[in-house]
Image (cartoon, rainbow, N blue to C red):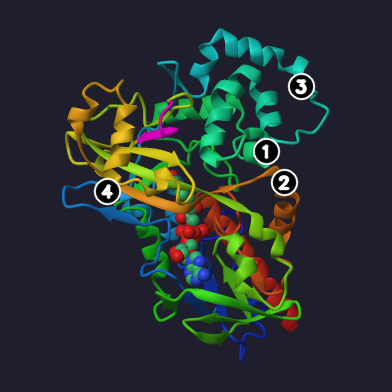
């Protein structure tokens, strides 16, 4: 496992200072973040214990295969050559040659982002945006940011419907941070796209916010699926991981974490690294109520319908956004257009993303009902129903963190610190941030460096 380029440093004696006789660091969750944290600490000679609630490692980074040869990740999953190299699986990845996004609007398809600028109404509205938005006043919601950035027409017709389907909340109730994550300069994007064309590699655009974008960072897919990343991190952690062991309590004494309860037993801990969703922390933490504001943080549940279809090239490009589909999904991904190996020859996989709430009619619908609803809105694909061969449905009650403006101050405070000494919250759900795997990895390493430095300072 490597450090950030330019920051590689040897393990110093100071890092290990005071470790002898200390209780282990407990890691909650064996997904990418938990395993990255555990592998880093273990490499420094720090004792770790990882408790994983489920029967398997990898969390969201799991991969399933069916007997016909279709491969399913949790939704579509793309990583970069930089992450693969950092984890040590770079030699076992295939290069993705192409990745493109499109938007379907009023029955027409536009390449994203530049194709949308072919529409006169969007251009005029973007030009007029300065007249309607006071740029000196800081935006208070995601709706303000999108209006300012794209103009009112594109914001209303494309951005708001997509945001609302994705988050389950109106754009004017979402914090500006939602839009900040999607900020890319058009010129920079075009240059990277051109680089991708020339090198025949899907250069990663808008993927990482922790590391620079460059023509040398492109999308790859590990042979064996994204789960391979976690399998590699697991090497060296033998004996540290307990599966089927949900952590039920995190014990705090004063303002410091002292242990956890898992599998009905108490375990002393010198620190706890949690990757659990933040809205459950107030219930898990015993001995203080400083995390109570997190209880109202919301995650968006999502249902992913993987449709197995005859043929290939059913969508105009890998991803198709559908702000006015009038149907249950807001995004379709034909993963084999970028990764042909995910479906048998002559067949393809369409992944439909359906926003929902736990227990609503989408959440409860049977797999075949869901497929039927999706197919009913795919009538623009020739013979869609005849091509359909079956589906696999995946559900998550916590697919996307929803940054509501009403708790944005609490979110920003939590992003600085949990407020409990020795308790660190990392990973996508642990940071309550829409992080892709590479940023989960770098940010978790940074958090572990800080944890180790604090321990060394406390022991000095
Ligand atoms: C639909 C979708 C598409 C995505 N696409 C991409 C993509 O293309 N590229 C990309 O890089 N990333 C993508 N991501 C993001 C990526 O999957 C995540 O960033 C990454 O897998 C998160 O890892 P994690 O360890 O933070 O969390 P998780 O994978 O959620 O792991 C957390 C683990 O903690 C365990 N746990 C929770 N509570 C407890 C408890 N109390 N006790 C014990 N264990 C507990 C869980 O069982 C789980 O195994 C996508 C995510 C989604 C939802």
Of residues 403 and 242, which is closer to you in this image? 403
**Residue 378, quarter of picture:** top left
Name the residue located 63 percent from the left edge and 40 percent from the top edge: 178
Q: Quadrant of the C terminus?
A: bottom right
- For label 4, the residue is 71
Q: Are dots 1 and 4 in contact, CB under 8 Å?
A: no
Q: Are dots 2 and 3 in contact, CB under 8 Å?
A: no
Q: Are dots 1 and 2 in contact, CB under 8 Å?
A: yes
2 or 3: mark nearer the eye: 2
Residue 441 position in % (x across, y down): 53, 57
Distance from the alpha carbon under mark 1 to that under mark 3: 18 Å
**Label of residue 406 in the image:** 2
Q: Which comes before the other along the chain, label 1 or label 2?
A: 1
Q: Which comes before the other along the chain, label 4 or label 2?
A: 4
Disc 1 residue crowd, few under 14, some 14–19, many 20+, Cα 10 Å: some
Residue sitting farthest toward the right: 136
Q: What type of secondary structure mainly makes up the magenta span?
A: loop
The span shown in magenta is: 326-333
Distance from the alpha carbon under mark 4 to that under mark 3: 46 Å
Residue sitting farthest toward the bottom: 21
**Residue 445, quarter of picture:** bottom right
Q: Which comes before the other along the chain, label 2 or label 3?
A: 3
- For label 1, the residue is 173
Distance from the alpha carbon under mark 1 to that under mark 2: 7 Å
- For label 3, the residue is 133
Residue 316 position in % (x across, y down): 35, 23
Is 2 placed left or right of 306 in the picture?
right
User: So how many labels did they put on this image?
Assistant: 4
Disc 2 residue crowd, few under 14, some 14–19, many 20+, Cα 10 Å: some
Name the residue located 38 percent from the left edge and 49 percent from the top edge: 364
């Amino acid at each position: 496992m490597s450090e950030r380029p330019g920051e590689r440093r040897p393990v110093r004696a100071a890092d290990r200072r005071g470790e002898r006789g200390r209780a282990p660091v407990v890691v909650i969750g064996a997904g990418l973040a938990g395993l990255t944290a555990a592998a880093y600490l273990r490499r420094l000679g720090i004792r770790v214990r990882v408790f994983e609630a489920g029967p398997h490692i990898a969390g969201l980074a799991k991969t399933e295969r069916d007997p016909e040869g279709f491969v399913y990740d949790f939704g579509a999953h793309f990583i970069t050559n930089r992450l693969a190299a950092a984890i040590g699986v770079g030699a076992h990845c295939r290069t993705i040659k192409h990745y493109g996004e499109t938007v379907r609007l009023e029955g027409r398809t536009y390449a994203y982002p530049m194709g949308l600028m072919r529409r006169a109404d969007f251009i005029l509205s973007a030009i007029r945006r300065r007249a309607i938005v006071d740029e000196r006043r800081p935006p208070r919601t995601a709706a303000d940011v999108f209006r300012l950035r794209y103009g009112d027409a594109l914001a209303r017709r494309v951005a708001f419907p997509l945001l609302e389907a994705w988050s389950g909340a109106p754009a004017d109730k979402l914090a500006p941070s939602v839009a900040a994550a999607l900020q890319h300069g058009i010129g920079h994007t075009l240059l990277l796209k051109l680089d991708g064309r020339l090198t025949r590699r899907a250069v990663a655009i808008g993927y990482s916010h922790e590391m620079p974008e460059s023509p040398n960072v492109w999308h790859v897919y590990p042979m064996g699926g994204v789960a391979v990343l976690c399998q590699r991190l697991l090497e060296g952690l033998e004996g540290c991981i307990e599966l089927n062991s949900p952590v039920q309590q995190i014990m705090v004494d004063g303002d410091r974490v002292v242990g956890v309860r898992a599998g009905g037993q108490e375990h002393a801990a010198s620190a706890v690294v949690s990757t659990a969703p933040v809205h459950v922390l107030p219930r898990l933490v015993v001995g203080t109520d400083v995390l109570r504001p997190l209880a109202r943080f919301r995650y968006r549940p999502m249902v992913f319908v993987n449709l197995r279809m005859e043929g290939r090239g059913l969508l105009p490009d890998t991803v198709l956004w559908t702000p006015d589909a009038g149907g249950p999904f807001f995004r379709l991904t034909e993963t084999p257009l970028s990764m042909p190996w995910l479906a048998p020859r002559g067949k393809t996989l369409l992944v439909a993303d359906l926003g929902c709430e736990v227990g609503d009619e989408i959440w409860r619908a049977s797999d075949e009902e869901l497929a039927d609803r999706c197919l009913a809105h795919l009538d623009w694909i020739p013979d869609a129903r005849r091509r359909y061969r079956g589906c696999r449905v995946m559900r998550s009650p916590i697919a996307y963190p929803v940054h509501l403006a009403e708790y944005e101050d609490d979110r920003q405070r939590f992003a600085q610190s949990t407020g409990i000494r020795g308790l660190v919250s990392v990973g996508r759900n642990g940071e309550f941030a829409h992080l892709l795997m590479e940023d989960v990895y770098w940010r978790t390493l940074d958090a572990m460096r800080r944890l180790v430095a604090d321990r060394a300072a406390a022991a000095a």
